[in-house]
Amino acid sequence: MNLTTTYLGLELKSPLVPSASPLSREIDNIKSMEDAGAGAVVMHSLFEEQLTLEKSQLHHHLSYGTESFPEALTYFPDITNFRVGPEEYLDHIQKAKETVDIPIIGSLNGCSVGGWTKYGKLMQEAGVSALELNIYDVPTDPDLISAEIEQNYIDILTSVKAAVTIPVAVKLSPYFTNMANMAKGLDLAGADGLVLFNRFYQPDINLEILEVEPNVLLSTPQAMRLPLRWIAILYGHIHGSLAATSGIHNAPDVIKMLMVGANITMLCSVLLQRGITYIQCLEKDLREWMEIHEYESVQQMQGSMSQLNCPHPSAFERAQYMKALQTYNPDSGRVYTKS
């Protein structure tokens, strides 16, 4: 069975790719991912807030007390000449590249144009084969119109693309008025691929100390339905690659994503729950299914069940919604087929 696939112009040995997670913080884990059969690894994210915080801290320490002694300014180097940022992250990339042969994809997480450009270039110099821009933005300004929000995504992408020569993918949320139009806009702006979808972690309230606190909930298989639908719709309509993420927990999930048009399937929650070696189980089950159903390669199945190739394209649109409601059996909790 030929499991090779192409993602962002990169030839991968498998469509199984661990996405950005704490697991990639250890070099041994990255090596284990390669040994288990991963086609590539997305590094844990470098956050925009990290860049802003470190820069502000450096500015504070370099300028502290200078207002009292004007001549003291001459003793301090120009702030712009300092290499500000998480050097450990870049060193980690270099070590990962020296340890494994599969592509390493860098991950930048933020919501505004700024340090992305500089650090995207530094990641390229450190050895990543591609970049993933994880644009995590929750607009709360009631006066901010949708066009401005969408333009911010385009501006971030174009600024990074202008600074690097490696492929750039955009990981985005589904919360756009017209998801298809947003995907087309990013495609035209030069995105080499789209990662669908980002999961927004919602805050919770601690009733004991009466404080808002983070609450991380791992995905469930049900979460795959949203990216499955949109990858099926977008397949064949954009030039870039499509990566499926969120809710992929078993081989059938992987197969479905590939059939609707995904180039790769990204794994996170399932690896956190079941361990890195579970990649081997997914590959084994994928190969068995392909053999039983007489598929010789992953590329043979990619897009075969997309909207573009589906006998009933409306299945991915409103008609399927109406059909689901009309055929739901409240007694059994199942959908039944009318004779």
Image (tube, rainbow, N blue to C red):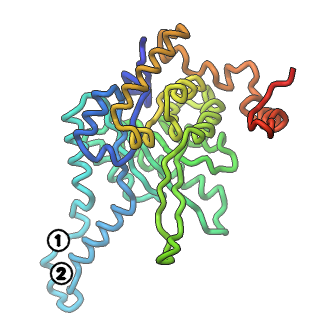
Q: Residue at x 33, y 61 (%)?
A: 51
10 Å neighbourhood of mark 1: few (<14), some, or many (≥20)?
A: few
> Front-most of 283 and 313?
283
Q: Marks 1 and 2, Cα distance to the nearest angstrom? A: 8 Å
Instruction: Please state which amino acid type lies under the numbered disc 2.
Output: Leu
State left or right for residue 101 relative to residue 336.
Answer: left
Image height check: is 155 above or below 204? Answer: above
Residue 274: percent from left, percent from top: 39, 38
* Label annotation for residue 77: 1
Instruction: Please state which amino acid type lies under the numbered disc 1.
Output: Pro
* Label annotation for residue 266: none
* Label annotation for residue 73: 2
10 Å neighbourhood of mark 2: few (<14), some, or many (≥20)?
A: some
Quadrant showing the C terminus: top right
Q: Residue at x 51, y 28 (%)?
A: 254
Q: Residue at x 63, y 30 (%)?
A: 232
Residue 33: percent from left, percent from top: 31, 33
Tell how many labels: 2
Q: Secondary structure at mark 2?
A: helix
Q: Secondary structure at mark 1?
A: loop
Examine the rendering and report whether any part of residue 194 can be seen: no
Q: Residue furthest left?
A: 75
Residue 29: percent from left, percent from top: 27, 39
Examine the rendering and report whether any part of residue 184 can be seen: yes
Find residue 304 and report its image quarter. Answer: top right
Residue 263: percent from left, percent from top: 49, 27
